[in-house]
């Protein structure tokens, strides 16, 4: 995972959800803090699919993958390294 990916994700969250990134850490819960709600998760999924050219499956939309910036970056990295399903 490149440092660029982290900056893209952080900037998207900051701009889309009007968040001061100085106030959140990469391991802070985006859901528990109220930054993301169900609509926010859908927006984030769309951004990830477009920006990183990966497909986010419905079963992959979990707190394990989308609760923190750190988890989002791990998810993107894992999906980017995985060969496409046939």
Image: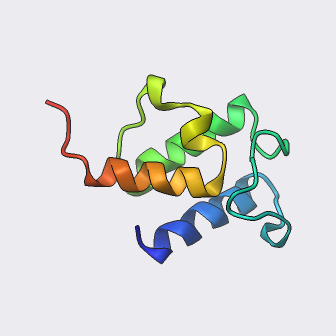
Q: Position of residue 15 (x, y in %)?
A: 73, 61
Q: Is residue 31 above or below residue 81?
A: above
> Toward the viewer: 5 or 53?
5
Q: Is residue 14 above or below residue 22?
A: above
**Residue 53 appears in the rendering:** no
Q: Is residue 68 above or below residue 56?
A: below
**Residue 60 appears in the rendering:** yes
Q: Is residue 6 above or below residue 86?
A: below
- The residue positioned 56% from the left and 50% from the top of the image is 71
> Toward the viewer: 44 or 82?
82
Q: Quadrant of the N terminus?
A: bottom left
> Toward the viewer: 8 or 82?
82
> Outermost residue, bottom direction?
3
Q: Would you identify the image quadrant in which residue 25 lies? A: bottom right
Q: Position of residue 46 (x, y in %)?
A: 51, 41
- The residue positioned 74% from the left and 62% from the top of the image is 14
Q: Position of residue 20 (x, y in %)?
A: 84, 66
Q: Would you identify the image quadrant in which residue 42 lies? A: top right
**Lateral position of residue 37 relative to residue 3, left or right:** right
- The residue positioned 46% from the left and 24% from the top of the image is 58
Q: Position of residue 55 (x, y in %)?
A: 36, 38
**Lateral position of residue 1 relative to residue 73, left or right:** left
How is the structure coloured here?
A: rainbow
> Outermost residue, top direction?
59
Question: How many numbered tags mark residues here?
Answer: 0
Q: Quadrant of the C terminus?
A: top left
């Amino acid at each position: 995972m490149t440092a660029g990916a982290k900056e893209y994700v952080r900037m998207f969250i900051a701009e889309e959800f009007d968040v001061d990134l100085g106030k959140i850490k990469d391991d802070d819960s985006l859901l528990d803090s109220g930054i993301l709600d169900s609509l926010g998760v859908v927006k984030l999924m769309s951004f990830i699919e477009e920006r990183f050219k990966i497909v986010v499956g419905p079963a992959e939309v979990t707190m394990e993958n989308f609760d923190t910036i750190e988890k989002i970056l791990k998810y993107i990295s894992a999906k980017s390294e995985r060969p496409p399903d046939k």
